[in-house]
């Protein structure tokens, strides 16, 4: 089932909230402002559904909010060191919106844009597709890029397909910035969530969270999630007191794989993250500071965790990380899914 209703006005444009439901008890709502996941209801071990993503009740909160809840992030998700890069011999200087670096596409990233509703489909796996044209020179990135993001409510979760084509060579890296709390949004912190990340390496960072350029093995470090462990284990024992805002290296891109599995003992919910991107960022809401969320809830530090499929941060300046270049006329096509079970 697909429902669409008015969600308010932004700069004179009507915004919408689109809700998808299936017969398996899952439902999800999306707003065309930021192409964002506004809610995702998932059953627990007793069949009781709860909304497990952080977000806002109103459009005005999405417009003014700074936490990027559920949004599609680009043109380049995560950080670019020094807010500049060189492509085809030309240096591009970007907006410095994060301690002298570029974060999530700059001051006016895709999370603060009104997307078009390109299509909706009904049936057993309903979907909504959002579109956006990003002009040449926007936030100083080269190339006009035509983008489509399709959210499909599959039998046991949500699949996101990203497609884009540029008229010039550019760098391009989309992700979704949902914060998950498998106990239900607003229901405490995520430090007791059990996380497994199938990554043998991660990218160490400097004090501004820019990768040093090394891909280091996780074995024996606080970044070793190759076997499941509590998110808060190495925070509580002092090895990594402030927690995680770090990138994990999955391997070569274009191969769909299980990147991470998250479980929550009290509800039995289990989330499996699959992607064909080469890396994934674990962020545990370090910057959340008690802002108002849905249903009168306050989102404090660690209220949710993000698992953002991506190219490695600062890849445009770190050729050893591979290539994030989208060549003119070539198609950018990646998929990430969040599927659920209960135990």
Image (cartoon, grey):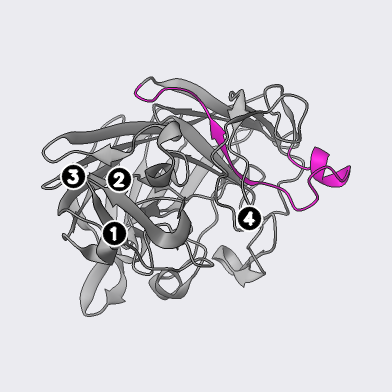
Asked if the magenta segment contains residue 251, the reply would be yes
Q: Is residue 158 visible from the viewing direction of this image? A: no
Q: Please, what secondary structure does the residue beneath circle 1 have?
A: strand
Marks 2/4: CA distance?
24 Å
- Between circles 2 and 4, the one closer to the viewer is 2
* Residues rendered magenta in the picture: 231-254
Q: Earlier in the sequence, mark 2 or mark 4?
A: 2
Residue 191 placement: quadrant: top right
Q: Which residue is mark 4?
A: 285
Asked if the magenta segment contains residue 175, the reply would be no
Nearer to me, 191 or 171: 171
Left or right: where does residue 142 sit relative to residue 249? left
Residue density around tag 4, few if under 14, some if 14–19, many if 20 or more, within 10 Å? many
The residue drawn where x is 31% and y is 32% is 334
Q: Which residue is mark 1?
A: 92
Instruction: Please tell me the numbered disc located at residue 172.
Output: 2
Q: Are marks 3 and 4 in contact (CB under 8 Å)?
A: no
Q: Earlier in the sequence, mark 1 or mark 4?
A: 1
Q: Please, what secondary structure does the residue beneath circle 4 have?
A: loop
Q: Earlier in the sequence, mark 1 or mark 3?
A: 1
């Amino acid at each position: 089932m697909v429902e669409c209703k008015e969600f308010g006005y932004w700069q004179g444009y009507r915004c919408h909230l689109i809700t998808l439901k299936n017969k398996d008890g899952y439902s999800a709502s999306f707003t065309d402002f930021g192409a964002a996941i506004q809610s995702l209801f998932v059953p627990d071990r007793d069949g009781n559904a709860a909304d497990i993503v952080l977000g806002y009740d109103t459009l005005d909160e999405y417009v003014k909010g700074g936490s990027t809840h559920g949004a599609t992030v680009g043109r380049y998700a995560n950080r670019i060191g020094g807010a500049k890069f060189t492509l085809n011999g030309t240096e591009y200087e970007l907006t410095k919106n994060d301690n002298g670096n570029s974060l999530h596409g700059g001051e006016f990233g895709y999370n603060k844009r009104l997307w078009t509703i390109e299509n909706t489909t009904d049936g057993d796996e309903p979907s909504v597709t959002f579109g956006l044209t990003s002009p040449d020179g926007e936030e100083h990135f080269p190339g006009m890029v035509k983008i489509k993001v399709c959210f499909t409510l599959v039998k046991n979760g949500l699949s996101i397909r990203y497609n884009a084509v540029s008229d010039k060579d550019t760098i391009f890296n989309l992700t979704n910035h949902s914060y998950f709390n498998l106990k239900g949004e607003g229901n405490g912190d995520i430090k007791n969530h059990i996380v497994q990340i199938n990554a043998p390496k991660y990218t160490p960072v400097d004090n501004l969270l820019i990768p040093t350029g090394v891909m280091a093995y996780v074995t024996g470090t606080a970044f070793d999630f190759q076997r499941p462990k509590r998110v808060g284990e190495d925070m509580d024992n002092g090895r990594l007191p402030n927690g995680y805002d770090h990138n994990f290296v999955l391997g070569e891109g274009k191969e769909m794989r299980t990147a991470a599995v998250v479980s929550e003992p009290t509800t039995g919910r289990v989330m499996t993250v699959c992607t064909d991107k080469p890396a994934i960022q674990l962020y545990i809401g370090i910057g959340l500071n008690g802002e108002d969320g849905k249903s009168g809830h306050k989102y404090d530090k660690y209220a949710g965790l993000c698992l953002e499929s991506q190219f490695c941060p600062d890849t445009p300046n770190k050729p050893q990380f591979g290539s994030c270049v989208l060549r003119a006329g070539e198609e950018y096509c990646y998929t990430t899914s969040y599927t659920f079970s209960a135990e």
